[in-house]
Image (cartoon, rainbow, N blue to C red):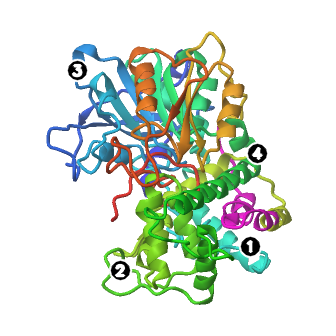
């Protein structure tokens, strides 16, 4: 708790200061060159860093402060500078600073901001309780045995008391280790932070590019501060009202979308056996090609006889054999991006059929945020859970989650674990969030019009949710990509990139009803992506959830 002493310190005010102060004080930002060089970032790329002191509790803005970490990449063409573009890549719990560094690195040949940074300062802010901001949360949990998505996944055969005890222990550990900051990490509080930071950088309006959960943040800001909206893009949009007020319904829709996306992978695999390396050939009852039959058989085989991971393989030092749950765990994460279908899913399945589980083990560990080299877990899944748990509206009826779990197991053949039993953790969470905003998520006609970018077969944020968000916002414009994967801007479609850039750089909205096609196909990646192989939802640790365009760099 010593690290949070500044966060909890009472701010001493001079006599009369509280009366004179109309609202929260706008932080002064002392931008300085960032302390360290970033591996893979060219020496010609220079970042500036700052710390912002904001109210810990906006209902009592003078009682205490919280410190946010910021980083910016100044606009290349200062003479044409449009202001700042604040970015958030998703989560909840994802870091903005680390990912922004990555997007300017040599590891990503298609740099997300190669055009936007000409005229915008790209500003990344790590949210409350995340990354380099104060009191970054960490339950210090073993995600494979303790965490929300621990393995083996719960089923109707799981002993209810054993599951409840495990979840209670995890929740107690999370609360104990993060108690000081927990109530204050709500999305609405961070939206309020962004409005102060907008003023700190000297912008009259907030320009914002948000992916996935970042669209919930953007929608919250838009509803709270409609008069301060500038050019706002919401890509891979969350159904904001459903996410915060009906999270179980939201997860059921997401799980259905994951099942549909897996079916689309199977169809692509059957139609292009060359790219699919023959997976599923002859697997059908009549000897026909059927990748789904082959997949289900492989999962059942791995449950009965786990697949070995040979020593000396190129992917992982974790030699634990692969179970059926590992296959499902790895696969759901690799459905987030169409580039992953051939690069990872096919690779893993073909190898596993040949008794080599190394790729599958690597991807399952990656999904769980486990680094076998260091033996540590990324805390990102903890942060994902905690931010949602303090603000989403969940029932405290424990039996409710066992009923939901059974219904999910009966409804979803492969990814039942994404809803139902997993939500028991939320139902028993004891901390309520400070400053939560639950809607309505509306934008008046007098405000700037947000651009909502949605993908028809997005597995993480279903397209119907995007349409619901647009209806709720009222003043919003929908831009659609016909295609697969989570989020569209940044190399999936040249058409999408052009429309988004036209809006952010020139203020020109696409015509109502504009639809673009995805350039990425099953066997051929987009010419714009090359190594843009994102995202793991919420980063390396939580591919089951919402997330944004994060990178993965393994083979």
Is 531 one of the magenta-colored residues? Answer: no
Dot 4 crowding, Cα within 10 Å, few <14, some 14–19, many 20+: some
Write down the region rendered in magenta.
Answer: 407-436
Q: What residue does disc 1 label?
A: 164
**Residue 95 position (above or below residue 420):** above
Q: Of callouts 3 and 4, which one flags the residue occurring earlier in the amino acid sequence?
A: 3
List the single residue furthest toward the top. Answer: 446
Q: Of callouts 2 and 4, which one flags the residue occurring earlier in the amino acid sequence?
A: 4
**Residue 145 position (above or below residue 235):** below
Q: Is mark 4 on a helix, strand or loop?
A: loop
Q: What residue does disc 3 label?
A: 77
Q: Is mark 1 on a helix, strand or loop?
A: helix
Separation of residues labelled 3 and 4 (CA atoms): 45 Å
Q: Residue 25 location in percent, x, y?
A: 47, 24
**Residue 28 position (above or below residue 421):** above
Q: Of callouts 4 and 1, which one flags the residue occurring earlier in the amino acid sequence?
A: 1
Dot 3 crowding, Cα within 10 Å, few <14, some 14–19, many 20+: few
The residue lying at 57 percent from left, 49 percent from top is: 546
Separation of residues labelled 2 and 4 (CA atoms): 41 Å
Q: Of callouts 2 and 3, which one flags the residue occurring earlier in the amino acid sequence?
A: 3
Separation of residues labelled 4 and 1 (CA atoms): 22 Å
Q: What residue does disc 2 label?
A: 317
Q: Of callouts 3 and 1, which one flags the residue occurring earlier in the amino acid sequence?
A: 3
The residue lying at 56 percent from left, 72 percent from top is: 280
Q: From where the camera sits, is residue 374 visible?
A: yes
Is 417 one of the magenta-colored residues? Answer: yes
Separation of residues labelled 3 and 1 (CA atoms): 57 Å
Q: What residue does disc 4 label?
A: 246
Q: CB atoms at circles 2 and 1 under 8 Å apart?
A: no
Quadrant of image for the C terminus:
bottom left
């Amino acid at each position: 708790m010593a690290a949070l002493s500044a966060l909890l310190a009472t701010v001493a005010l001079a006599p009369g200061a509280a009366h004179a102060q109309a609202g929260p004080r706008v932080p002064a930002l002392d931008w300085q060159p960032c302390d360290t060089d970033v591996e893979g970032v060219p020496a010609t790329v220079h970042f500036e860093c700052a710390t912002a002191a904001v109210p810990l509790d906006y209902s009592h803005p003078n009682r205490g402060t919280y410190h946010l970490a910021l980083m910016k990449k100044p606009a290349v063409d200062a003479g044409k500078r449009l202001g700042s573009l604040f970015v958030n890549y998703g989560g909840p719990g994802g870091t903005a600073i680390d990912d922004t560094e990555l997007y300017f690195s040599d590891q990503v040949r298609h740099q997300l901001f190669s055009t936007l940074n000409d005229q915008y300062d790209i500003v990344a802010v790590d949210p409350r309780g995340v990354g380099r901001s104060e009191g970054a949360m960490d339950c210090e949990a073993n995600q494979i045995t303790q965490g929300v998505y621990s393995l083996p996944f719960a089923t109707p055969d799981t002993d209810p008391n054993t599951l409840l005890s495990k979840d209670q222990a995890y929740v107690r550990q999370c609360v104990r280790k993060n108690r000081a900051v927990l109530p204050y990490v709500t999305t609405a509080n961070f939206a309020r932070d962004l409005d102060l930071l907008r003023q700190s950088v000297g912008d009259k309006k907030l320009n914002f590019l948000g992916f996935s959960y970042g669209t919930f943040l953007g929608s919250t800001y838009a509803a709270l501060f409609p008069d301060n909206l500038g050019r706002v893009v919401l890509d891979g949009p969350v159904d904001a009202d459903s996410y915060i007020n009906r999270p179980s319904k939201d997860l059921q829709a997401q799980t259905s979308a994951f099942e549909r996306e897996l079916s689309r992978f199977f169809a692509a695999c059957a139609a292009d056996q060359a790219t699919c390396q023959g997976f599923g050939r002859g697997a059908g009852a009549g000897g026909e090609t059927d990748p789904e039959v082959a997949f289900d058989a492989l999962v059942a085989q791995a449950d009965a006889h786990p697949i070995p991971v040979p020593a000396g393989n190129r992917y992982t030092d974790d030699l634990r054999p692969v179970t059926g749950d590992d296959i499902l765990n790895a696969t759901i994460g690799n459905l987030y991006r169409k580039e992953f279908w051939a690069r990872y899913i096919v690779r893993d399945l073909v190898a596993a059929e040949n008794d080599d589980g190394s790729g599958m083990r690597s991807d399952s560990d990656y999904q769980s945020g486990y680094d076998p080299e260091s033996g540590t877990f990324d805390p990102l899944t903890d942060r994902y859970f905690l931010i949602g748990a303090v603000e989403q509206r969940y029932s405290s009826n424990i039996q409710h989650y066992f009923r939901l779990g059974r219904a999910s197991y009966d409804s979803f053949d492969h990814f039942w674990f994404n809803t139902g039993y997993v939500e028991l953790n939320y139902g028993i969470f004891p901390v309520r969030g400070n400053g939560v905003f639950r809607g309505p998520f509306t934008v008046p006609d007098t405000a700037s019009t947000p651009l909502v970018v949605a993908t028809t077969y997005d597995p993480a944020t279903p397209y119907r949710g995007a349409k619901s968000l647009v209806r709720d916002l009222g003043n919003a414009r929908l831009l659609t990509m016909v295609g697969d994967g989570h989020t569209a801007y940044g190399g999936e479609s040249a058409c999408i990139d052009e429309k988004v850039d036209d809006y952010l750089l020139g203020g020109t909205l696409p015509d109502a009803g504009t639809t673009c096609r995805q350039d990425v196909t099953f066997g051929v990646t987009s010419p714009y992506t090359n190594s843009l192989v994102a995202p793991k939802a919420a980063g390396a640790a939580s591919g089951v959830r919402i997330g944004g365009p994060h990178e993965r760099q393994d083979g």
